[in-house]
Amino acid sequence: MRVIIRTAGELCVTVGTLIVLFVVYLLFWTGVRADGVMDGQIDLLREEWSRAGPPSGASPAGPGGPKPYARGRPFAIMYIPRLGFTWNKPVLEGTATATLKKGLGHYPETARLGQRGNFAVAGHRRTHGDPFKDFPRLRRGDAVVLTDGTTWFTYRIDKGPHKTVPSDIEVIDPVPRTSGYTRPGRYLTLTTCEPEWGHSHRLIVWAHLASTQPVEAGKPEALRR
């Protein structure tokens, strides 16, 4: 009997250790690795921008206008001062699992950055760098600033965080029904999972494009400390 009890105890300790190591992996190592990947995406963008080429992921404009962003490629950097003045994340085209491990993901079916319509972006709440861990802190009036290397786009949040279910795909419509907007405009939608470690629901914020300025003019007011 003592042998059985001792063996069971050792097994519990082993299982407990494995669980702790797995939690450490989720909380720490995936975050460290993801931060490095996202920093690499930002470095890639800045290198391309320094060569004065078109924004990464975008093809040069043709006779029919700008072509779609290239799937899985970064094309912009997002800043949200409410989440910290050192918070900045790359925005890539697409919302596939592999893409969201590298940064935030643009819903391909929505508008391009700064254009008329709804520019919608998704991000992980937890794991893979926890980009939207503090999403519930966002408030009306907060700035969400993006740049594509040539222009600064400053959006201002109008509503959220709004809780809904994953099947509520209307949140990224050109004029989202529950956003409070009643006519077409230049909007931004951010989405993430709820609860913090689950995915049974979604948190949404909506914003409108408040101003733009060329990169050569310096940082927009929202990013000046």
Image: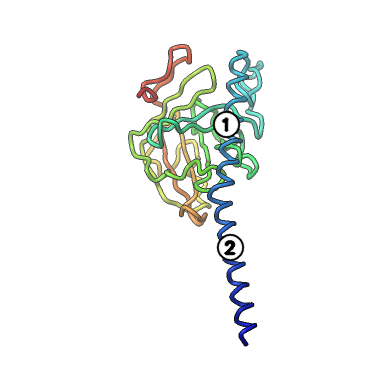
Pick the quarter of the image with the C terminus: top left
Q: Nearer the viewer, mark 2 or mark 1?
A: 2
Label 1 crowd bin: few (<14), some (14–19), many (20+), radius 10 Å: some
Spot occupied by residue 46 in the image (x, y as percentages of width and height) = 58, 21
Q: Is residue 88 left or right of residue 94?
A: left
Q: Residue at x 33, y 33 (%)?
A: 141
Up the image or down, 40 lies above or below 221; here it is: below
| Residue 77: image location, x then y, percent | 52, 28
- Where is residue 7 drawn, in percent x and y? 64, 77
Specify the farthest residue to the bottom.
1
**Element marked by disc 2:** helix
What residue is disc 2 on? Answer: 17
Residue at x 34% of width, y 39% of height = 139
SS at badge 1: helix
Binning the other alpha carbons within 10 Å of mark 2 as few (below 14), some (14 to 19) or many (20 upward) gives few
Instruction: Say the numbered circle drawn on residue 39.
Output: 1
Where is residue 218 shown, x and y percent of the image? 43, 15
**Cα gap from disc 2 to disc 1, whole angstroms:** 32 Å
Asked where in the image residue 1 lies, by quadrant, the reply is bottom right
Of 149 and 84, the residue lying toward us: 84
The residue depicted at 47 percent of the width and 12 percent of the height is 216
Rendering quarter of residue 94? top right
